Amino acid sequence: MIVYNQAFDLYHAIFRFLQFLNRFENGDLIEIERLRIWDFYLLFPGKIHDIRLKQTESDIRKIRKEFIKDSNNPYEKVSEDRKVFEKIKPYQLAALKCIASYGIIDKSVLNQQRVALVNKEILNEFINNCEDLPAKDKNVVTLMTSHFNQISLFGLDGLKNRTNLMESKYDA
């Protein structure tokens, strides 16, 4: 039996990254690792409830509880987050290279482990030709690009440490 999983679909990865990039303006820089983490949570929205939050972030707790319901979809169950996160890495990186080849993001900055949006017009053309995201996915994109964009990627309270998807022990 063949089972489709959007996590291992290059074209779906491109679609997901375009949704995140659409929240930014020309010249904005985003770390590739941050985008990869956001993408994981767009693929598996129920896992957002596993992200460690500070006690002072009770408003985010309420938002994720109300707007990002945990589903019982068996295809969204992940037993080993880090392994799945590493398995989807080649698809994510290939998607970013493809987006760069269309001139939406800067190729040279991509080599520096960052993404810089350079052509919002082309991005908007692609977005306009795609279907809208479901409400739950829109909520994930909004939460990731607002609150989790303001959090540092590194350190004890950094995004890498809070999600535990990547090694953060040796980060500066």
Image (cartoon, helix red, strand yellow):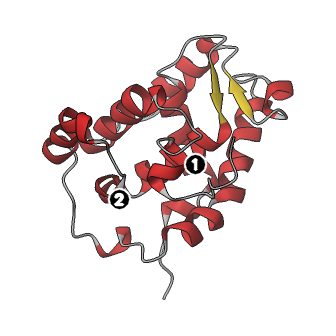
| In-front residue for pair 57/60 | 57
Residue at the spot 42% in from the left edge and 48% down from the top edge: 42
Mark sitting on residue 47: 2
> What amino acid is at disc 2?
Lys
Left or right: residue 30 compared with residue 16: right
* Left or right for 63, reference 133: left
Q: Mark 2 to mark 1: distance in Å?
A: 18 Å
**Which quarter shows the C terminus?**
top right
Q: Residue 116 at what x, y percent from top left?
A: 69, 21
Q: Residue at x 64, y 67 (%)?
A: 87
Disc 2, disc 1: CB below 8 Å?
no
Q: Position of residue 71 (x, y in %)?
A: 22, 63
Which of pointers 2 and 1 lies earlier in the amino acid sequence?
1
Does residue 132 show up? no
SS state under label 1? helix
Question: Can you say whether 140 is above or below 105 in the image?
Answer: below
Residue shown at 60% from the left, 57% from the top: 166
Mark number, residue 13:
1
Q: Position of residue 121 (x, y in %)?
A: 60, 11
